[in-house]
Image (cartoon, rainbow, N blue to C red):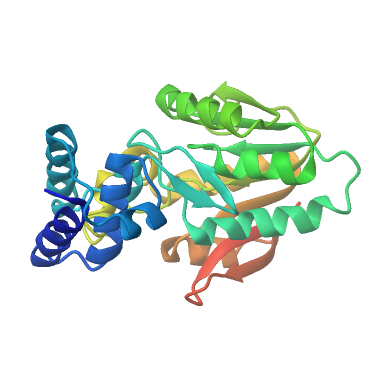
Amino acid sequence: MNIKEALQKTIQQLKQANIATYHIDALLILKDTIKKDDVYVLTNPQKELNDRQIEEIERLTNKRKLRYPMAYITHSKEFYGLEFYVDDRVLIPRPETELIVDVTLKIASDIKNPKIVDIGTGSGCIAITLSKLLDTHITASDISKEALNVAKLNAKRLDADISLINANGLDFLKNGIDIITTNPPYVLENEYELLSEDVKFEPKIALIPPSGNGFIEDLIEKAKQLTKWLIMEIGPSQLKIIKNSRYIYKIIRDFSNKERVAVFKF
């Protein structure tokens, strides 16, 4: 089987499985397997594949047919222009989370040597991006040791100045912090079942808060004792709590016009 035949077969299989992005995903699977770029794949259609490559393409195609996320298959996700390693130990970085970086950069520009802490860092995408763009040290924490191993890998690959701490919430912090950033778990139990099958492959601990909206309320309450600014990604179920807070400074909408990032000033 050559490259052209493998690509056509993969496209057809993913299309039959109702994968909306079947063409792009098929190309990514092929590229990831043979370790070549788009140009090589498209300009060498007659290149024969070996048995190992054919078996690997079939294996990855079958995983994708089950809605296993492409980012986990390729172990790669772009965030704010940087390429991050990801696997099923961490949440996949999303474009809307880049809004946290946007706001933080703007606020930090008015602070000399800003002290910034990222809570629930996961892959480290927020902390690492801020560290590189601000050329400063960032502290990042996560309750999951497995997630921290991924963040450590990304920090090394991207040469970022961050320290990683295994901790739950804000309990490890002392006051004197300028900005706390976080993309906390905010999907409620009843909302989880409505998520797409792709998302359900992501770690549940990064999606569902342990005590529902009480977790978010506690986060806000503790943050006001520790920091001047709290920048937090949110979902629709948190809007009432957040809009009723005396400390809410701004709510930013994402590209779908959904209220997505809450900015608190204490």
Residue at image position (15%, 60%) is 14
Residue 47's x, y, as percent?
Answer: 23, 48
Residue 109: x and y in percent read 85, 53
The x and y percentages for residue 2 are 16, 50
Does 211 sit above or below residue 173?
below
**Which residue is at a point 31% across and 52% down the rendered structure image?**
28
Residue 38: name its quadrant: bottom left
Question: Who's the residue at 32% across and 43% down the image?
Answer: 32
Image position, residue 216 (x, y; %):
50, 48
Left or right: residue 233 compared with residue 231: left
Q: Name which residue lies at 29% across and 41% down.
A: 34
Quadrant position of residue 18: bottom left
Q: Does 137 sit above or below residue 108?
A: above
Between 222 and 127, the residue placed more toward the observer is 127
- Towards the viewer: 86 or 51: 51
**Does residue 209 appear in the picture of this structure?**
no
* Number of residue marks: 0
Compared with residue 181, is residue 249 higher up or lower down, i.e. above or below?
A: below
Instruction: State which quadrant residue 98 falls in.
Output: bottom right
Whether residue 68 sits left or right of residue 243 in the image: it is left
Q: Residue furthest bottom?
A: 257
* Residue toward you, 28 or 241: 28
Which is nearer the eye, 85 or 4?
4
Q: Is residue 186 left or right of residue 30?
A: right
51 relative to 249 in the view: left or right: left
Residue 229 visible in this rendered orientation of the protein: yes
